[in-house]
Every structure is written in C-alpha cells, then in structure tokens.
Image (cartoon, rainbow, N blue to C red):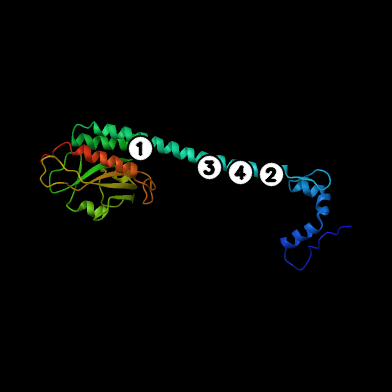
Amino acid sequence: MSVSPDLSSDLPEPHWPEIRAWLQANPQTLLDDRSLLEEIGLKPHGRNVVEFGRAALTRLEAAAEREADARKRIEAVARANFAAQTQTHVAALDLMEARSPSDLARRLDAVAQGRFGLTGAAIALEKPGAVPFGWKPLDSGGVDGLLGEHGLTWLGPNFEGLNLFGAAEDEVKSVALIRMSPVFPGDDAGARPALCAFGSSEDEGFTPTMGCELVAFIARVVERTAERWPILS
C-alpha cells in the first residue's frame, strides 16, 4: 500500500525536490487520483497512461496568442511607418512647388498641420542679412545657441524665448529643430545658418530619444528649395 507524503513537517511550506522525489518513488498514487489529475489539466487513460493534451493545448494556445499579438504590433508599426513616409513624400512634392521664399514658409506650415497633425512649422534665418517675409529672424549665433556649436538637431520640450510659431506659440509643448545652411544665389557670404522648426501640441510629440529622419528629410527639402531664390534686401 502506498503512503501519502508527510507534508505537515516543521518546514513553513513543502519543498518541491522532496515532493518530486516522493512522486518518483510512488507514481501510482498520482495515477490513481483521477480528480487531482483533472484539476491540474491532465487526463488519465488507463494504467500508467496520462494524456497531456489539455495542458499542452493550453500552452500552445497561449504561445499562439502571444505570437499573434506580436505580429499585430509589428504590422501596426509597419503601417504607421509606411503612412508617415507616404505623407513625407507628398509633403516634399508640395514644398518643391513653392514659388517664393514666403510661399515656401507658408507651405511648410500648412503641411506640418495638415499632413502631420502638428501645431505648426517655421523657417528661421540668422542675421545679418535680409530675412524673407514669413521667415523668423535670429540674431547672429542664434542657431548655435539653440543646437550647440556642432549640433544638427534638437528634439524635446518647447522652451521660453524660442518664439518661432507666432500666434500658436502657447500651444506648442514640444519641438524639433533641424539645422540648415542654405546658400542663396548672389550671396557672397556663403552659407547662412538657419533652422527648420516643427512644433507639437503634445508633450511627447518630440522627445530626445525619438528618431528624426522624417523631419530631417523635410528640412533638407526646405533647404534645397530655398536656394532657388536670392534673398532681397
């Protein structure tokens, strides 16, 4: 006759190695307890035969659900990336149709709002020198002051004194600033420091850990398009 293991020892709880060793020594005790087998998801089939179907199926179903969830997340990210790239390419075409520097600034602000759901966008250009209508003037050294001497981009919260978004400035919670260096026809001074700025109404709209490839691409399109026209005094 098999004897049940004595689990009522002085130990605070049973130790699995001891239980396992006892079950190995007395396997028939477990096989004969049909109700216990069913409670833990095992189905007995005659003597010394136990079907693991329900437990195995449960594990397989859980794994399948995890894989399906992961696949759905990957597909959602891929769709979002494709949509963002498509909107970026359409925006680039719209910007390249600009007829003047002021039209370029207007179009940039329009595509930022209409295609990317941002609060706005702006082009800023350092003085000395003329600044086109619709662009934001910056004092000499202003770009380095915002991005650092060798900085190319800055993504993060909006900060006091930026003042690049006009009437929408109070709505802007986070910004993306991209350095530009356009060379305008007839300008003997060479490249002029400039910024392409994007503003979001969301605190997490732009963050330091976020990739900036798409906004940087738009900034390059703005920079090259702006070089079509001389900056008149």
Amino acid identity at mark 2: Ala
Q: Secondary structure at mark 1?
A: helix
Tell me whether the residue at label 2 lies in contact with that at label 3, contact meaning CB atoms closer than 8 angstroms. no
**Where residue 70 is drawn, which disc sits there?**
3
User: What residue do we see at 55% from left, 41% from top?
Assistant: 69
Tell me whether the residue at label 1 lies in contact with that at label 2, contact meaning CB atoms closer than 8 angstroms. no
Q: In this rendering, which labeled residue sits more in front, label 1 or label 2?
A: 2
User: What residue do we see at 81% from left, 43% from top?
Assistant: 45
Q: Judge from the rendering whether residue 188 lies leftward or rightward of residue 36; answer left or right.
A: left
Residue 76 location (% of width, % of height): 47, 38
What residue is disc 2 on? 56
Q: Quadrant of residue 83?
A: top left
Quarter holding the N terminus?
bottom right
Residue 157 showing in the rendered view? no
Say if 5 sits above or below 137 in the image.
below
Q: Which badge, 2 or 4, is on the more N-terminal residue? A: 2
As measured in the structure, the alpha-carbon distance from the residue carrying label 1 to the one carrying label 2 is 47 Å
As measured in the structure, the alpha-carbon distance from the residue carrying label 3 to the one carrying label 4 is 11 Å
Q: Which badge, 2 or 3, is on the more N-terminal residue? A: 2
Q: Secondary structure at mark 4?
A: helix
What residue is disc 4 on? 63
As measured in the structure, the alpha-carbon distance from the residue carrying label 2 to the one carrying label 3 is 21 Å
Amino acid identity at mark 4: Ala
What residue is disc 1 on? 116
